[in-house]
Amino acid sequence: MTRGATGPTLVLVIAVGVLVAAGVTLVLERSLTRILLGVILLGNGVNLLILLGGRSGFAPVVGTAPTGEMSDALPQAMVLTAVVITFGLTAFLLAVAYRSWYLTGDDEVQDDLEDRQIVRLAERNEVSAADLGGEGPDLDPEQVDPEPALRRLRRRGEQR
């Protein structure tokens, strides 16, 4: 953005769109390396979008320019925070991708059994019978059993 302009230039808006679109496309891939690159592109696109939301002008230092001509410092601080968060997420994803490559020789995310079952049911347009609700706490394996904590409390009371 140039000083005194009324809004962001078309080139910067297109750059945001390209970065976000490429980032989302890469995040939806199966390879952890592509997911990592997608997170980086998505983070840079969002950071540029945040910067475009601020007012352009002189440095926001008191006494260097009239207050009406200073740039907005809040988007700059938000982008600085977002850069640190994106760096931390990038480091974590890089560690996960390296560990996956070290253990399996590949960084592709594999399907688990539940994913395959959901795909099969979606192809047949059926609902999973595993959790239809109304089974009661004794028949539903997903229900949490509160009894162990009560048993521990009773045992402590009996030992005293």
Image (spheres, helix red, strand yellow):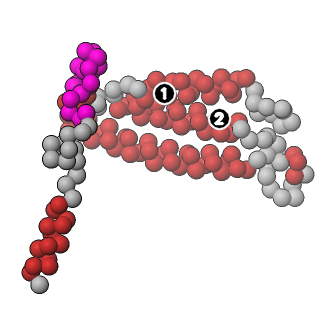
Q: Which of marks 2 and 1 is nearer the N terminus?
A: 1
Q: Quick check: 53 above or below 156? A: above
Q: Quick check: 160 above or below 154? A: below
Magenta-colored span: 116-132
Residue 110 percent coordinates (x, y): 25, 29
Residue 71 percent coordinates (x, y): 79, 46
Q: Which residue is drawn at 26% across and 20% down?
A: 126
Q: In this view, does 45 lie to the left or right of 52?
A: left
Q: From the image, tell me which residue sits under label 1.
A: 24
Q: What amino acid is at disc 1? A: Val
Residue 90 percent coordinates (x, y): 44, 42
Q: From the image, tell me which residue sits under label 2.
A: 49
Q: Which residue is drawn at 79% across and 31% down?
A: 7
Q: What amino acid is at disc 2? A: Leu
Query: Looking at the image, can residue 57 be seen?
Result: yes
Q: Is residue 77 left or right of residue 71?
A: left
Residue 154 percent coordinates (x, y): 14, 73
Tell which residue pokes out farthest to the right in this image: 66
Q: Residue at x 79, y 52 (%)?
A: 60
Tell me the quarter of the image containing the N terminus: top right
Query: Looking at the image, can residue 102 be seen?
Result: no
Q: Tag 2, which secondary structure?
A: helix
Q: Is residue 45 left or right of residue 63?
A: left
Q: Tag 1, which secondary structure?
A: helix
In magenta segment, residue 119: yes
Q: How far apart are marks 2 and 1 (CA)?
A: 15 Å
